[in-house]
Image (spheres, grey):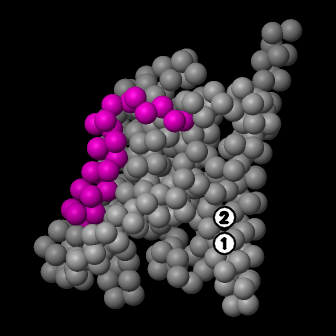
Amino acid sequence: MFEKDLIRGKRDSAASHFSFFALTFAWSWACWVLSSIMKTEASVTARALFLIGGFGPGIAAVSVVGFCCGRIGLLHWLGRCLQWRVGWCWFGLALALPVIVMGMAAAVHVLLGGTMPPSPAIGHGLMVAANFVLVFLVGGPLGEEFGWRGYALPELQKRWGWQTASIVLGALWGIWHVPLFYINGTSQSQTSILTFSVSAVALSVVFSALFNQTRQSVLPALVLHTAINSLPSIIPVMPSNDEPRPYQLVVGILALVAIGLLFFNGPEARRQAQDNDTDH
């Protein structure tokens, strides 16, 4: 009887994983495709659909947890995601790491003989702060992190361990962005799919290490994601037709950080992930 219950539990878990990813991709891709179709005739509606599409992972996570675990389970899950007593140093690291990586990439680019355009933030401090808040709300973090890290990562690493789970989730995260490569005006439309995919997998490893070190709280991940998406308005490292190297250097540095975490932080992060799974 126990073995049958265990098999049934694994099947239910697999079904919920599939439901999460299916709903995430269906919601986001449908919104983005419709947005692209309607862009010329109904620009306001198209923009709204584009922004709503970015909330696919979060909507999918809330839907799956609520359906499978009920209201009490959903509240418990949200409580774990919103833990804030995880040590302020982790929030500081989440904010500082993108600054360090992008700053290093810009410096190396200049040392190699390249030039950097003036920072768009010069003389616009208030706009930079407003942009940070705007990015947090509708620029990716709030719509994605409760899904990718809050729901998908804990479930995947129970099955495969944190390292494999990070790589698999990073690949899926990259694939989820594919429609954005064909929509004019997105940052993805100015990058190669290969380079972006490498950055998605590398960032997934970084996010996973941070997530597991902070008792599976989503809050530091939100800070990290917001910093990553908003800092190019201060340090202009995103690719352009004339100079893709700064972004390539960013991706290269991130890849080195990810490799270091996978090989040198593996036992500690694995232990932390196992402790978190036991606690929750």
Q: Do labels 2 and 1 touch, CB within 8 Å?
A: yes
**Can residue 154 be spotted in the picture?**
no
Residue ID at (66%, 80%) = 44
Q: Is residue 165 left or right of residue 104?
A: right
Q: Position of residue 37 (x, y in %)?
A: 74, 83
Query: In which quadrant of the rendered image does the N terminus lie?
Result: top right
User: Given the image, on which type of amino acid does mark 1 rest?
Assistant: Ala
Of residues 186 and 260, the one nearer the viewer is 186
Of residues 63 and 134, the one nearer the viewer is 134
Q: CA distance from mark 2 to mark 1?
A: 6 Å
Query: In which quadrant of the rendered image does the C terminus lie?
Result: top right
Image position of 11 with respect to 152: above or below: above
Q: According to the image, label 2 marks what residue? A: 52
Q: Position of residue 179 (x, y in %)?
A: 64, 72
Q: Which residue occupies the extreme top position in the image?
A: 1
Task: Report how many numbered discs are placed on residues in the image.
Answer: 2
Picture quadrant of residue 265: top left
- Label 2 Cα crowd, 10 Å radius (few <14 / some 14-19 / many 20+): some
Residue ID at (54%, 43%) = 149
Element assignment for label 1: helix
Residue ID at (34%, 47%) = 94
Q: In the rendered structure, which segment of residues is drawn in magenta?
A: 81-105
Element assignment for label 2: helix
User: Given the image, on which type of amino acid does mark 2 rest?
Assistant: Ile
- Please say whether residue 226 is one of the residues in the magenta stretch: no
The numbered disc on residue 274 is none
Image position of 147 with respect to 6: above or below: below
- Please say whether residue 86 is one of the residues in the magenta stretch: yes
Q: Position of residue 125 (x, y in %)?
A: 27, 69
Q: Is residue 16 left or right of residue 240?
A: right
Q: Is residue 51 left or right of residue 105?
A: right
